[in-house]
Amino acid sequence: MGSETHSNQLSVIKLVQNAYDLMGEGANFNRIMKGICCLSANNGRLSAEFTVSEEHVNDKGTLYGGFLAALVDVLTATCVKLLIPESRIVSIELSVRFTLP
């Protein structure tokens, strides 16, 4: 990978991370992005990580499925926005299947 390509990737990651950080500071539902760390973002693909904490789990102590679905929605929208910057993104349908832990 050339240094210019690597530099471009780093600037995209920083752009995405800044957006997630701003979302995480909000008082509305966007605050679910607090603590989400963008690891890579390139050609419509994105990798992110976060540490599961008490605010992410249900009464059984497992990751809350609604949080995970919302996170998938935001990350997917980010991928579309990176591919088509002028696009307005609205989810029309989202389906997530969960299995028992």
Image: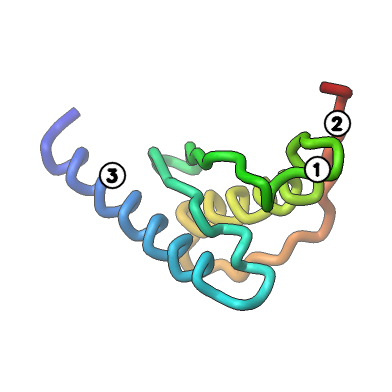
Up the image or down, 20 lies above or below 28; here it is: above
Q: Position of residue 22 (x, y in %)?
A: 45, 70
Q: Say whether residue 40 is left or right of residue 2.
A: right
Please name the residue that numbered disc 2 is placed on: 98
Q: Say whether residue 3 is left or right of residue 56.
A: left
Mark 1, residues whose alpha carbon is within 10 Å: few (<14), some, or many (≥20)? some
Please name the residue that numbered disc 3 is placed on: 9
- Determine which quarter of the picture holds residue 33: bottom right
**Disc 1 secondary structure class:** helix
Q: Say whether residue 11 is left or right of residue 30.
A: left
Q: Position of residue 25 (x, y in %)?
A: 50, 71
Amino acid of disc 3 = Gln
Up the image or down, 81 lies above or below 26; here it is: above
- Determine which quarter of the picture holds residue 59: top right
**Disc 2 secondary structure class:** loop
Q: What's the mark number on residue 77?
A: none
Question: Residue at 56% of width from left, 53% of height from top?
Answer: 80
Question: Residue at 78% of width from left, 36% of height from top?
Answer: 61
> Is residue 45 visible in this depiction of the protein?
no
* Badge 1 or badge 2: first in the primary sequence: 1
Mark 2, residues whose alpha carbon is within 10 Å: few (<14), some, or many (≥20)? few
Q: What's the mark number on residue 65?
A: 1
Q: Quadrant of the N terminus?
A: top left
Question: Residue at 69% of width from left, 47% of height from top?
Answer: 56
Q: Name the residue nearer the viewer: 24 or 14.
A: 24
> Is residue 78 visible in this depiction of the protein?
yes
